Image: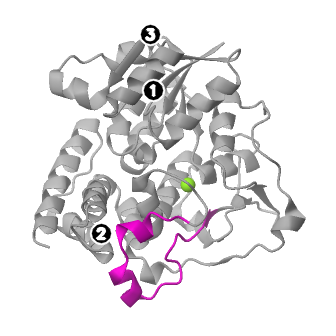
Amino acid sequence: MVRIALVGCTGSIGSQVLEVVRRYPDRFQISALVAGSNAARLALLAKEFHPKIAFCANVVEKTHKACSHEELFADCDIAFIAASGFTGLAYTMSAIEAGKTIALANKESLVCGGELVMQAAKERGVSIIPVDSEHSAIFQALGCRREAEFKKLILTASGGPFLHCTKEELARVTAKDALKHPTWNMGAKVTIDSATLLNKGYEVIEAKWLYGADFSAIEAVVHPESIVHSLVYFEDGAALAQLGYPDMRVPIQLALTYPERLPCAPALDLAAIGTLHFERLPAERFPCYELALAAGTAGGSAPTVLNAAAEEAVRAFLLGGISFPNIAETIEYALSHTAMSEAGTYEALFEADKKAREAAKTFIHGK
Ligand code: MG
């Protein structure tokens, strides 16, 4: 029996993790559930899965009745980190300290804390299994060996709903337009990040840390059908890819059953699909992508500042407070108005996150 501590149990990924547990009750058991703030949903899930520990992170923070992270991960075999945002990093670090295998669906853990996380995982001998579809595809193409050799990684990108919009059109798009993703069904934050292509920038940074690749060895290519989930190029010119319908159930389940594969989703009907398309990523119309890469290259606290500003900007955009192009402008403002540090510790990143949010809010309130 594999015991799972699930952080982020009420979101899109968390709900699909619980689907896997329902599908294979003889194999999986939930040892702990952590929700963000959806207490009603958490109560229902706790009744169904009988975890030893269940709490709402936002409520605990307010009441200070904190369950230590040590307790949270003590009884699990796999820590599934599906929380969204910077808060995920603290859980990832605690799960590593507890020496538990991590199924990582929280992008920010690697975007903000890549160096910390990979270093700590190495020291503790902890495996990190990627859940993001692109990184799972690369993992699969490498034979489920993160340390395998390759020449180049190609991340595919659907391009989001605004792929062919002009700059003028992008200035007028609404949150409702941005939430209509053409191929993937995901949470609101990552859907908006897909529309700005910030998400693809995040994924390049994630790939760098997961696979120890230089930025020059990672490329993003637009593939609107989202059937090829990413590719690996090898020294001899061969390329291996993982294909499937855009369905997060596959990478989620594989992260739990790997190296074994169990029935999960329908196989591809290639003839019905017909044609697959690929094109260059239009980075010039999507400044968030370039900003992410620049922050990733700068390192230190820069990616944390970028992410904190993006979290604040996307929240404001969803509430109708700022325009679509203002998202990139908020990030730019925060990057140039927050003191950067070499980071190195979680505390330094936590501080950078707080400062960057203040800067972002200043910019947003001026709009
Ligand atoms: Mg992805």
Comparing labels 3 and 1, the label whose residue is closer to the camera: 3
Distance in Å between CA atoms under marks 3 and 2: 40 Å
User: SS for tag 3?
Assistant: loop
- Circle 1 residue: 96
Q: Amino acid at mark 1?
A: Ile
Q: Which residue range is magenta in the image?
A: 155-181
Mark linked to residue 52? 3
- Residue in the foreground of this view, choosing between 13 and 281: 13
Q: Earlier in the sequence, mark 2 or mark 1?
A: 1
In the rendering, at what x and y percent does residue 306 appear? 30, 59
User: SS for tag 2?
Assistant: helix
- Circle 2 residue: 327
Q: Is 24 within the magenta?
A: no
- Residue in the foreground of this view, choosing between 279 and 36: 36
Q: Quadrant of residue 40?
A: top left
Q: Decide: few, some or many residues near mark 1? Use Cα within 10 Å; few <14, some 14-19, many ≥20.
A: many
Q: Amino acid at mark 3?
A: Lys
Label 3 CB less than 8 angstroms from ligand 1: no
- Residue in the foreground of this view, choosing between 276 and 117: 276
Q: Earlier in the sequence, mark 3 or mark 1?
A: 3
Residue at horizontal 17 percent and vertical 20 percent from the top: 64
Q: Quadrant holding ligand 1?
A: bottom right
Distance in Å between CA atoms under marks 3 and 1: 20 Å
User: SS for tag 1?
Assistant: helix
Residue at horizontal 61 percent and vertical 73 percent from the top: 222
Distance in Å between CA atoms under marks 2 and 1: 33 Å
Q: How is the image coloured?
A: one colour
Residue 234 in view (yes/no): yes
